[in-house]
């Protein structure tokens, strides 16, 4: 059985945003080279402070078996146990200093997140789901992929078509079926002063 999720939005929002969620059940079908290029192109066109474009990505499609398996190794066990079924894996990295001046870029993480948002929404538009993961060994990733100093590996993104969830471990099936929840806007949208509704 394939899980479907309800998004109880309080206002109408774009279907791409409404329908996106982070599954753990992928159908083991590789992304094509074109699909992955299209998805990365969306990240390319994200805005960034000073147009610095501090994002860097290491990518592997499922059909690139050796590269794909290499990308699985830094993942926490609780993630690799389902991410192994993804159609592609992406490691998102941010450059911490401006390339021109060498000064710290305090928007580096912000802009990487923005590029990632473009990436996952473009994927959703292509019928490809995404699931981001902070659970991985950053030192191991740095070593394995020879990530230079000044660049921080931040987030993995599993991409792929959703599959049935019956084969997942029980605790993962439970998480998979849990209802979607968010804070109400009154808890994060303020006027006049911080915290004031
Ligand atoms: C930066 C980041 C790190 C995350 N790390 C993990 C992770 O290590 N393992 C996991 O299963 N989900 C991880 N998630 C997924 C979140 O738990 C998920 O996005 C959140 O619960 C909201 O659910 P939704 O994406 O289905 O709307 C991560 C998400 C983000 C954005």
Image: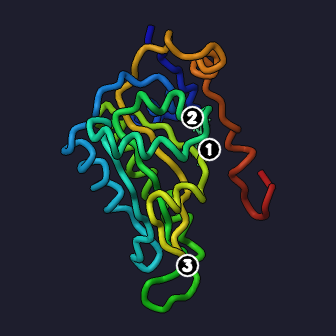
Q: Are marks 1 and 2 in contact (CB under 8 Å)?
A: yes
Which image quadrant: the N terminus? top left
Report the residue at 31% width, 38% height from top: 65
Does dot 3 land on a helix, a strand or a loop? loop
Please tell me whether mark 3 or mark 1 is closer to you in this view: 1
Relative to 52, say whether 84 is above or below. Answer: above
Mark 2 residue's CB less than 8 Å from ligand 1: yes
Disc ID at residue 149: none
Q: Position of residue 169 (x, y in %)?
A: 59, 16
Q: Are marks 3 and 2 in contact (CB under 8 Å)?
A: no
Residue picked out by circle 1: 135
Q: Earlier in the sequence, mark 3 or mark 2?
A: 2
Disc ID at residue 79: 2
Mark 1 residue's CB less than 8 Å from ligand 1: yes
CA separation in Å, label 1 and label 2: 7 Å
Q: Position of residue 182 (x, y in %)?
A: 66, 35
The answer to whether 15 appears left or right of 107 in the picture is left
Q: Position of residue 142 (x, y in %)?
A: 52, 62
CA separation in Å, label 3 and label 1: 24 Å
CA separation in Å, label 3 and label 2: 30 Å
Q: Quadrant of residue 138?
A: bottom right
Q: Position of residue 8 (x, y in %)?
A: 57, 25
Report the residue at 57% width, 21% height from top: 176
Report the residue at 42% width, 58% height from top: 115
Does dot 2 land on a helix, a strand or a loop? helix
Residue picked out by circle 3: 105
Report the residue at 39% width, 43% height from top: 121
Residue at the far left in the pictured view: 34
């Amino acid at each position: 059985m394939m899980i479907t999720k309800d998004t109880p939005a309080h206002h109408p929002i774009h279907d791409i945003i409404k329908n996106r969620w982070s599954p753990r059940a992928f159908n083991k079908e590789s992304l094509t080279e074109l699909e992955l290029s299209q998805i990365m192109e969306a990240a390319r066109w994200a805005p960034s402070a000073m147009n610095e474009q501090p994002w860097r990505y290491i990518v592997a499609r499922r059909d690139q078996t050796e590269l794909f398996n290499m990308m699985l190794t830094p993942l926490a066990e609780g993630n690799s146990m389902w991410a192994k079924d993804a159609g592609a894996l992406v490691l998102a990295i941010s450059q911490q200093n401006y390339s021109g001046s060498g000064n710290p870029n305090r928007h580096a993480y912000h802009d990487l997140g923005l590029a990632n948002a473009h990436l996952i929404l473009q994927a959703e538009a292509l019928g490809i789901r995404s699931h981001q993961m902070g659970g991985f060994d950053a030192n191991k990733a740095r070593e394995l992929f020879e990530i230079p100093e000044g660049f921080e590996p931040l987030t993995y993104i599993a991409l792929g078509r959703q599959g049935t969830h019956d084969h997942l471990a029980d605790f993962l099936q439970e998480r998979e079926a849990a209802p979607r929840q968010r804070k109400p806007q009154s808890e994060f949208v303020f006027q006049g002063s911080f915290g004031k509704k």
